[in-house]
Amino acid sequence: MPELPDVEVYRRYIDSTSMQQRIDNVHVESPSILHETTPQALGRVMNNEVFHTTSRHGKYLFVELSNEQWLFMHFGMSGKLKYFKGQSHTPDYTRLLISFVDDYHLAYIAPRKLGRIGLTDSPKQWVENNKLGPDVLEISEDDFLNLASQRRGSVKSWLMDQEALAGIGNIYSDEILFKSHLHPKRTVNSLTESELKQLHKNISKVLNTAIDADADPGKLPSSYLLPHRDKGGRCPGCKGELALIKVGGRTAWYCPSCQVNS
DNA sequence: AGGACGCCCTGTTCGC
DNA sequence: TGCGAACAGGGCGTCC
């Protein structure tokens, strides 16, 4: 589930818990989550350093160490973080445990080991090498319109394509399309300029609202789709039953009355 | 280019 | 009740 809002909440969590503490151990429980590095290299680079700054691009979280190397984390479908005291309290499914002095720890938890973790000396370069599109909260209206003009296919697939726009996943694409009254299968080239401008505004509104709600769907306004996005769920607007289709191999929930494919 | 699919991985939910 | 199948989610690779 971790999409841009979740990752931004994790970034702030690290900022408020884990900065400026000497790292005295790095334990990799599941080496398969490492991307182009090894447990030994991770330990060598991180031991005796401290976290300096954090940043985020799309669904990727970057943490700068005091030696100017960066740790990056991606959370796959089930990843999260937990900061705690006392190693005996290590959560289940901890795949990476970063231990600070005085028995404080930061756990990277991922029941489904689909996330990945690695090192880079430049987040900017890393984003380029991995062909990530612009962070979707940073993109201007003009650039958004320009990107749309180069795109065909369904609007939902476009929003979720990390090479096109970085940060939106399945859950929040549904929410953004609901707020924009757009059917998930509407083609990008069929969208009017005014629909695109509205879509661009709604991306920021929805994602920022989610961040303010700690990326907890239960804390979102009941006028949002997500609290109702389940079997038997009803549209908070017209009260009609929500529908379920596959778009790009993903489950898309939408309101067939409020989001018409025309 | 983009859609359809399978795969990764595992806890949870569904169907018989 | 109990079992296995299907599903969820993000990303990547392959085929068309």
Image: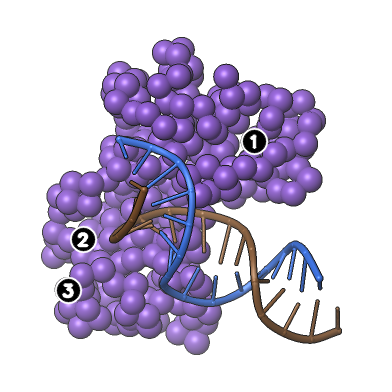
Chain colours: A purple, B blue, C brown
Q: Are marks 1 and 3 on the same chain?
A: yes
Number of marks in the rendered image: 3
Q: Position of residue A9 (x, y in %)?
A: 46, 51
Whole-Å distance between the Cαs marked 2 and 3? 9 Å
Q: State whether residue A74 is above or below residue A154.
A: below
Numbered disc 1: what chain? Answer: A
Q: Comparing marks 1 and 3, which lies closer to the viewer? A: 1
Relative to A142, is A78 on the left or the right?
right
Which mark sits nearer the N-terminus, 1 or 3?
Answer: 3
Relative to A216, is A132 on the left or the right?
left
Q: How many other residues sit within 10 Å of disc 1, few (<14), some (14-19) or many (≥20)?
A: many
Which mark sits nearer the N-terminus, 2 or 1?
Answer: 2
Q: Which residue is mark 2?
A: A70
Q: Which residue is mark 3?
A: A45
> Which image quadrant for residue A39?
bottom left
User: Which of the two residues, A167 or A87, is positioned nearer the viewer here?
Assistant: A167
> Which image quadrant for residue C3?
bottom right
Q: State whether residue A30 is above or below residue A121.
A: below
Q: Comparing marks 2 and 1, which lies closer to the viewer? A: 1
Whole-Å distance between the Cαs marked 1 and 3? 46 Å
Looking at the rendered structure, the secondary structure element under dot 2 is: strand
Q: Is residue A193 visible?
A: yes
Q: Position of residue A124 (x, y in %)?
A: 18, 47
Given the image, on which type of amino acid does mark 3 rest? Val
Given the image, on which type of amino acid does mark 2 rest? Trp
